[in-house]
Amino acid sequence: MSETTSRTRRRALPAPDVLNTRFVEGAGVVQPEPAPPNPPQPFGDLAAASVEELFEAADMVGDGDASSVRSKRRQSVSAITQYLSAFPGGTWQERWTASELDDAEDPIPFSQVRRRWVETGSIVQGVTLMTTFRAIHPSLRALRANMLPNFAEVFLTGQGTADIDAALRAIESSPYSGLSRRRARHDLAAALVTQKIAMSDLTPSALLHYAWEWRRICTTIGNGEVSFGARVLWEILCETGHFPPTTPNTLRRALNGNPHDLAALISRYELRNKAVERLLVDYMRIRVADGLDFSSASALARTLARNFWQTIESVNPDQNDLRLSPETYRAWLERISVKADGQPRIDTDNIQLAVRAFYLDLSAWATAEPERWGMWAAPNPIPPSATRGYAVRQRRRQEGIADRIRVLQPLLPRLVQHIDDELAAARRLLAATQKAQPGELFTCEKIAYRRMWTKYDSDRARWDGTAPVRAQRLSDATVTNAELTEDTAFWTWAVIHTLRLTGVRIEELLELSHLSIRQYQRPNGEVIGLLVIAPSKTDRERVIPMSAELFHVIAEIIRRLTRTGRPIRLVRRWDQAEKQLSEPLPFLFQRHSNTASGCISENVVTRMLRGACQSLAPADHRFSTAKFTAHDFRRLFATDLVNNGVPIHIGAALLGHLSLQTTRGYVAVFDEDVTRHYQQFLDNRRHLRPQAEYRPATTDEWSAFEDHFDTRKVELGTCGRPYGSPCQHEHACIRCPVLRINPDMIPRLKVIEQDLVDRRARAEHEGWKGEIEGIDLTLSLLRQKHAEALRLSGHPRTVHLGMPSAAP
């Protein structure tokens, strides 16, 4: 079991980013980093070299090549030098700058030059060679306007440095597509050339400047959005350790600067009163120093800066201090009671409590440090009566959540069946599309398709070695990316099943890693799978026993992540709440695409759940209004535990709650049921363990605990009742909700069902109405268990994970 991490250690604010906040999006064009005093010269100082010296350097580029190849290189060097000699300057770079080539908006100047020097060689190849010599440094505009063939390969291999060779090996071994790896090599070469630096000088700031220049110069992407360059290269340099460990692992996060700047948390709301803004910043710094984690600090800053003072300035622009008049307070309270979209706000009490605490803190600090806080001490505008009825409103809110869970509970089996069917259909379509030849017609699920194949697919196959697996439905010409559809269906399936079978929070779900899987072997050889949940909200590490179905889901995830023969990739997860990166870990919920890879985010999980409900809505109108969230599965899990007879303190341990009252709030059952379970637990505990609490178990007690698992084995499967609890259903296993059917006993269920049908016919003949009622109840429960057993039996009994190769 991994070491328990304290909340303070885990939630501590990290060191400031290595990136300067001047790179924040919207700050304008970033100034380039100063060029090093001694720029790299892999072939010596060729800034003003003669043509013969350039010829010798050209022969060194491809040492060992055929004489014809070396001759073409010399012709290319001769072509570019003859053209540049017509322009003024003492160095080749000065002549290059004086020509029309460096400021080219399009490749027309190159086309003119190419026609002029077509007989003596390729001037395009000559530009590539002169750049490799570091004799000229083209601008990014010139590199983008004129696509130099094999520019990145010739330049990077020509530098002959170990760090560049290591970066090339990292790019080649990365899981990205061939096209993305090619773009990463081009970005690496272009960044080194345009900034006149060596690989050791390619810092996060330097590459971020290159990304901004790309955005400023390059054309927009297909959907009209402006793209940034070097996205894949940034991730690779972070993973290989070229960038410092505190560097954000994606370019998008690096563009946001330092998210833990408390002054930025307040200043983003653009308060007019700068004195109050500085006060809020000082207040936040003290609260964070007292141990407030960043997620709570961000919420508090939003409450005080936006919901409080920004709203005060809107209702009373002349307000200059914290002394609010009753009229201003009433106007503010009326304003915050309604959200911007016109909907009533449900957290008004929390806002008033935070503002009231703010005033009380200032008054207390003014007594201790009057010279610093005395000028801000003011009467608290929020009276104690403002939050009167807070407990009642909390209960009404909890009742609404319980009603929602009662609505969702009968819909869960339908959702589970739907995602199983969607994954199976997506896999069948993917297999049929992969078997079809380009342009071939095929049929899947009685629907006619055509395997799509365009020039784009041909180019991808040539550059990447693979092409998108796309199918066009002939009935309406709809094109489906079968690979992407299957990938989305699989991760939706994995997310929903893991949430419903574990009851973990969404953050805990995304933090599951390969290291979270443990096993416990009983003396009789039986192995029990365990899932270790890392400390999260309540800072409590806990262990969840894995059922056979949950173990199957986890095994399928591991099989998918290791299907290439490599171990699960070590990635750094971005904590959306704390705005910080984790250590590199083999996270289970990670995906790989052509241009990016990494852990699945909370927003992606939300979209998956929403998409599953929306796709089911046409077939089941109940899903047109009912929506599942990640936390709904946690409440459904808690409700299912208590309804099936599990003591509430066991449910609290599985859910990671510190208080039984918290677990009680998660359970959507009648209050008397919860009270009955709770009182039964207390009575049993007082009777069994009145004195020696939590003493070490004796050998006999441990043997009895081990034997308990054997006594739970019944004819049809396994009883899931907790340890030490008797059978509450008088061994009526067919009616028991905690019976786990063994798939091998499905034929036995059919025999029992036929026997019940015969007994019911006899009861009808004899007129035994009470017997008929009992048999009907038993039949309905038997058929439910039969359907569930059939669904689970469709899963493979074993999942082959393969043997991943050793890491290089």
Image (tube, rainbow, N blue to C red):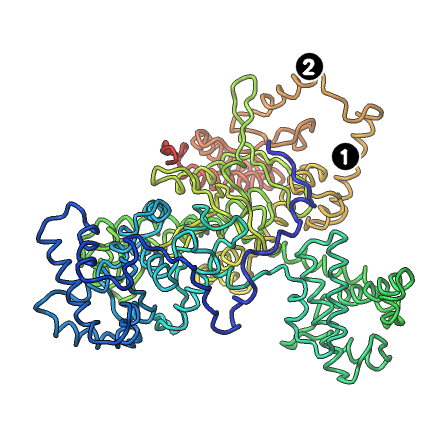
Q: Which residue is painted at 73% across and 60% down in the image?
A: 285
Q: Position of residue 292 (x, y in %)?
A: 73, 54
Mark 1 or 2 closer to N-term?
A: 1
Above or below for 534 versus 402: above
Q: Quadrant of residue 546?
A: top right
Q: Amino acid at mark 1?
A: Phe
Q: Looking at the image, can residue 450 be seen?
A: no
Of 579 and 457, which appears nearest the observer?
A: 579
User: Which quadrant holds the C terminus?
Assistant: top left
In the image as oriented, which residue stretches furthest toward the bottom?
A: 318
Q: Which residue is painted at 54% across and 63% down in the image?
A: 256
Tag 1 and tag 2, C-beta contact below 8 Å: no
Residue 681 circle label:
1
Relative to 631, 38 lies left or right = left
Determine whether the residue tagged by mark 1 lies in a helix, strand or loop: helix
Q: Which residue is painted at 17% across and 57% down in the image?
A: 55
Q: Position of residue 782 (x, y in %)?
A: 52, 38
Of 417 and 532, which appears nearest the observer?
A: 532
Mark 1–mark 2 Cα distance, whole angstroms, equals: 25 Å
User: Which quadrant holds the N terminus?
Assistant: top right
Of 752 and 421, which appears nearest the observer?
A: 421
Q: Amino acid at mark 2?
A: Thr
Disc 2 designates what residue? 699
Determine whether the residue tagged by mark 2 lies in a helix, strand or loop: helix
